[in-house]
Image (cartoon, helix red, strand yellow):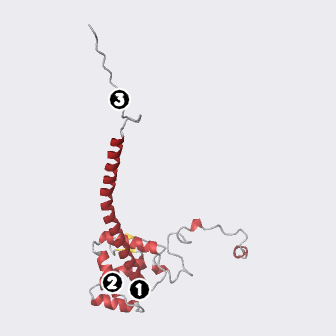
């Protein structure tokens, strides 16, 4: 009686990595197709980010015009913009309407008059209030966006500190210590 011995050997076409050239090409084609399909929603997201930047640019432009401050902090403006858009779904659209009302060389009062005529006076007042107080909203649900950077402290910043519980202003401990031989102290 003869025994039949069967061997399970790998195909000769394998290249030592456990895959054939055909399997590699099919996997590469599948990855390419997957990458192409996942890029489509990314383009839509990129378009929405671009339009969001346009709305932010409009917000900064409106803020420059209504506050008549040409050196507003853009990062702070982005935080105000984010806070407003979280509380108002139509904020970007209305900011665009305000941006279209801006005329070169106009004063803040002229922009406010045009905004009132367009029914956006209260909306524009909310933007001004936010920049000057550092808060969005005027009730206990309001959001604090800025404290020290609020515009209401700018006119007196050369003589008065931002009011806090300490007499030296916010983050006073980050300033260098005064000199031990300060002439003012020795004159006392």
Count of numbered tags: 3
Dividing the picture into quadrants, the one containing residue 13 is top left
Is 151 on the left or on the right of 136, as rendered? right
Question: Circle 1: is it few (<14), some (14-19), or many (20+) Cα within 10 Å?
Answer: many
**Relative image position of residue 131 (x, y in whole percent):** 41, 78
Q: Which residue is mark 1?
A: 65
Question: Circle 3: is it few (<14), some (14-19), or many (20+) Cα within 10 Å?
Answer: few
Mark nearer the viewer, 3 or 1: 3
Mark sitting earlier along the chain (3/1): 3
The answer to which of 66 and 29 lies nearer the viewer is: 29
- Alpha-carbon distance for marks 1 and 2? 10 Å
Could you say which disc has been placed on residue 10 in the image?
3
Classify 45 as above or below 5: below
Classify 46 as above or below 30: below
Residue 140 in view: no
Q: Which residue is mark 2?
A: 98
Dividing the picture into quadrants, the one containing residue 107 is bottom left
């Amino acid at each position: 009686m003869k025994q039949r011995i069967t061997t399970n050997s790998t195909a000769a076409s394998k290249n030592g990595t456990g895959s054939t050239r055909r399997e590699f090409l099919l996997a590469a084609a599948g990855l390419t197709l997957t990458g192409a399909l996942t890029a489509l929603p990314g383009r839509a997201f990129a378009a929405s980010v671009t339009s969001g930047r346009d709305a932010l640019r409009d917000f900064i432009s409106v803020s420059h015009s209504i506050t008549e401050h040409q050196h507003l902090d853009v990062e702070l403006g982005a935080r105000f913009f984010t806070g407003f858009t979280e509380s108002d779904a139509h904020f970007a659209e209305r900011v665009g309407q305000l941006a279209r009302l801006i005329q070169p060389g106009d004063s803040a009062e002229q922009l406010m008059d045009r905004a009132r005529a367009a029914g956006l006076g209260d909306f524009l007042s909310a933007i001004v209030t936010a920049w000057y107080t550092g808060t969005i909203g005027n009730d206990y649900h309001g959001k604090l966006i800025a404290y020290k950077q609020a515009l209401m402290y700018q006119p007196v910043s050369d003589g008065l500190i931002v009011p806090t519980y300490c007499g030296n202003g916010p983050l006073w401990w980050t300033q260098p210590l005064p000199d031990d031989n300060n002439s003012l102290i020795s004159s006392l």
